[in-house]
Amino acid sequence: MISSSSKVKSSGVVDIGISDHSMIYCTLKLRADKPRLEYKDVRSFKNYNSESFKAELSQLPFHETYRINDVNEKIDHFNQLFISTLDKHAPIKHIRIKGRLNQFINKELKCTMKLRDKKLRIFRLSRNAEDWDVYRQLRNSIKTSLRAAESNFVRNQIEEYKGNSRSMWKVIRGCLPSKDSEKPVYQKDHKKLANEFNEYFASVGKIAADKVKRLAEANNIQMTTALPPARHRSSLDLFEFRTVTPDEVRTIILNSPSNKAPGADKINIQFIKDSLEVILDPVTDIINCSLMTSTYPSMWKIAEVVPLHKEGDPEIASNNRPISLLSCLSKICDKVALNQYTEHLTNHRLLTGHQSGNRKKHSTETLNIAVTDMLLEAMDNKQLSIVILLDMSKAFDSVDHNMLLQRTLNLGVSSALHEWFKSYLSDRWQYVRIGTTFSAPVALSHGIPQGSVLSPFLFNIYTDSLSSVPNSCSLESYVDDS
């Protein structure tokens, strides 16, 4: 009541005369606003059959994709054929979001729960002791059955997800009490709210970068964009992409998690897997065209952003975390680029060993081992150690494109690959979706794409020279924590 002044209609102090203490009163707004119904657009699997879908796709002229030279036109042709067929087999439905029953509640339990509720209504009408006993026995029986069903469900999930830490943590979190399990209810106009959120999310990177500049000026710190000098390399040593094979693309697609939400094109990875035999060659051709022409498709640069409420008033943009949804096809291309570039940098040992995040065979454990080893060595040498912990605010959002591109050049990439990265970063747009309402698109001037598998590695490249800045101490990092 004290923390939510909006719930208080009026308040005051009354002198009651018979005591040294006055009476404090308040009038509360007890009438709650009626929450508006929430809707979403989803694909209906009611009549979906993967074999029928694949059979119809096999009759379509995907081979015409090979004759097109422009990668954007290739994407348009592919999407037109694929999405039009998908819309027939799994049409998009506009549905109301309802509360979900727990997964361990089966049909038998549902029927028993309905019978329990019926017996309660009978007792309320009759006020008969026998009717109460019937209801009470059913209620207690259902409680016992629910506990047993939940226990068996969790036990089976733990057994199923052995060795999969990501899924195991989901099971564990589901067993723990949640601070706020309810979805936020927005009272403002959804269109206006989505535009406000989008303007905020798109500007946080530039705001963070400008704030750093102001702090530097206020403290007489000279900022520089200078990078360590690049190693001299002959043109033969410069890294460039090679064409990818259908087998490599197949492996990436089959290893992609199927539970990821699709991007603006609404092509879910599961539909790509179901039709892989038909579309593998066209998809490979599109990816190779992008890599060889140094052009990242414009359609893949559009991000759909869904706000995830963190805490506080959900209608305040800063109280929400933006979740960016990108095209599943773009993630396949990004993975191809990531695999090739990572292999080159690793084989030639071009990155420092001070970053433990977003690297194979590295984790928070390797970081802790490195820091602990340094502390123990200092103790052996009778030295005093001081640990300073730093966290970069809005790290991914505030990445300067020009500095990142210069950093890739310093690491030895061909001019064609440099142009591909430039195309990957430039001319990106995003819009915010709240329910089924969309904001106007906004251009992005700073940062690396959230939701892309390539972005974390680009951040490692961007911050790699950070370890050379301190002159008299060591620096270890895990992504944006140092």
Image (cartoon, rainbow, N blue to C red):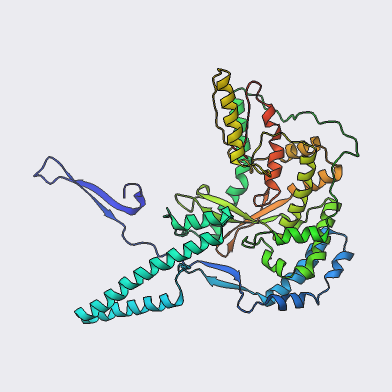
Task: State the image coordinates of residue 413 (x, y, percent, origin top left).
Answer: 83, 40
- Asked if 10 appears above or below 42 in the picture, the reply is above
Identified at 64% across, 75% down, the residue is 91
Task: Identify the residue at the far top of this view.
Answer: 382
- Asked if 268 appears above or below 129 in the picture, the reply is above
Identified at 84% across, 61% down, the residue is 285
Identified at 76% across, 49% down, the residue is 339
Task: State the image coordinates of residue 213 (x, y, percent, origin top left).
Answer: 63, 31
- Position of 441 compared to 180: left or right? right
Q: Residue 209 appears in which quarter of the rendering?
A: top right
Task: State the image coordinates of residue 114 (x, y, percent, origin top left).
Answer: 37, 78
Q: Residue 286 appears in which quarter of the rendering?
A: bottom right
Task: State the image coordinates of residue 449 (x, y, percent, origin top left).
Answer: 68, 49
Give the number of callouts: 0
Query: Is residue 445 at all visible to an observer of this figure?
Result: no
- Position of 359 compared to 388: left or right? right
Query: Is residue 169 at all visible to an observer of this figure?
Result: yes
- Position of 432 compared to 242: left or right? left
* In-front residue for pair 44/29: 44
